[in-house]
């Protein structure tokens, strides 16, 4: 079975220890309940490819000017080598600006926000995985920053498929969560928006921030990508590769908190 590499993000540690201070012997990894031998645990200093995926629909509870300020904050906090793409979605996703580190281009692209139609969020995520990130060969830090309340209107893509593809490709989803346009109302044949967001973020090892705290969130997200991102590599043993398995990463110091994706999807036929 081929080795698997997981993105691991350090949330906190005593004194925010130096990235090189950790060794593989400090961690235990369980794949499908089976203890695994960790081959490598090392910091990832490579630049990030970031897609900012913006709900561009009419009932989105954030104005164009508010979203523009968020894009400016994210662009201002890019580290050297990082590149950001801006995509707006309604019934279809649309690239508003290609990967760039040019703040002026990213800010100018926000003029294309139009707030029309209904949000096919899961379809937009699936298109981003297949049409954007699968073309980024050799990039280990691949991130989606989703600006949304989590509302999805009848996407063709099931959540299981979208989440599985994000996990398989090691794409981490951060969410800047706007106010819920449904006000928490139960939905037929669909998850509540807040539940959908939670599954996307926790399933991929990401985080959720309130949209109203987007300015400090932008700094925190980009700092995580640059200073607290690791790679863990192991060769699975004792598991069936065609099955989706739960992952558990444990650490011998309770003061250290880590995040990684919650599952390893089975290998497609």
Image: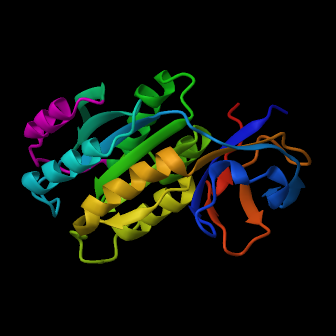
> x, y percentage for residue 100?
30, 27
Rendered image quadrant of residue 210: bottom left
Nearer to me, 244 or 55:
55
| Quadrant where the N terminus is found in the figure | top right
Does 73 appear in magenta? no
Residue 132 makes an appearance in the image: yes
The residue lying at 11 percent from left, 49 percent from top is: 115
Query: Against 171, is 94 above or below?
Result: above
Residue 152 makes an appearance in the image: no
The residue lying at 34 percent from left, 55 percent from top is: 219
Q: Which residues are magenta?
A: 101-120
Residue 205 shown left or right of residue 85 in the figure: right
The residue lying at 50 percent from left, 26 percent from top is: 134
> x, y percentage for residue 107?
15, 38
> x, y percentage for residue 17?
63, 60
Rendered image quadrant of residue 11: bottom right
Rendered image quadrant of residue 170: top right
Residue at the farthest right position: 238
> x, y percentage for residue 247?
72, 57
Nearer to me, 68 or 22:
22
Query: Against 224, is 99 above or below?
Result: above
Query: Against 178, is 228 above or below?
Result: above
Nearer to me, 62 or 240:
62
| Quadrant where the C terminus is found in the figure | top right
Does 111 appear in magenta? yes
Query: Against 182, is 176 above or below?
Result: above
Residue 183 shown left or right of residue 1 in the figure: left
């Amino acid at each position: 079975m081929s080795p698997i590499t997981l993105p691991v993000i350090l949330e906190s540690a005593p004194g925010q220890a130096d990235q090189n201070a950790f060794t593989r012997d400090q961690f235990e990894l369980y794949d499908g309940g089976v203890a695994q031998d960790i081959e490598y645990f090392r910091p990832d200093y490579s630049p990030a490819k970031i897609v900012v995926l913006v709900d561009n629909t009419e009932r989105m509870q954030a104005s164009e000017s508010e979203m523009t300020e968020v894009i400016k904050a994210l662009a201002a906090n890019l580290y050297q080598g990082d590149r950001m793409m801006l995509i707006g979605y309604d019934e279809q996703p649309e690239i508003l600006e290609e990967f760039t580190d040019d703040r002026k281009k990213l800010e100018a692209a926000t003029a294309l926000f139009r707030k029309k139609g209904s949000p096919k969020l899961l379809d937009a995520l699936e298109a981003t995985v297949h049409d954007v990130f699968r073309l980024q060969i050799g990039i280990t830090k691949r991130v989606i920053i989703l600006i949304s309340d989590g509302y999805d209107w009848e996407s063709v893509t099931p959540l299981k498929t979208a989440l599985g593809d994000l996990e398989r490709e090691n794409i981490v989803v951060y969410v800047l969560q706007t106010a819920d346009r449904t006000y928490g109302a139960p939905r037929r044949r669909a998850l509540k928006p807040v539940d959908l967001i939670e599954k996307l973020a926790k399933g991929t090892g990401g985080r959720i921030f309130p949209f109203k705290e987007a300015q400090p969130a932008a700094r925190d997200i980009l700092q995580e990508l640059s200073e607290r991102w690791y790679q863990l590599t192991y060769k699975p043993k004792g598991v069936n590769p065609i099955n989706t398995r739960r992952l558990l990463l444990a650490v011998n110091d309770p003061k250290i908190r880590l995040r990684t994706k919650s599952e390893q999807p089975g290998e497609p036929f």
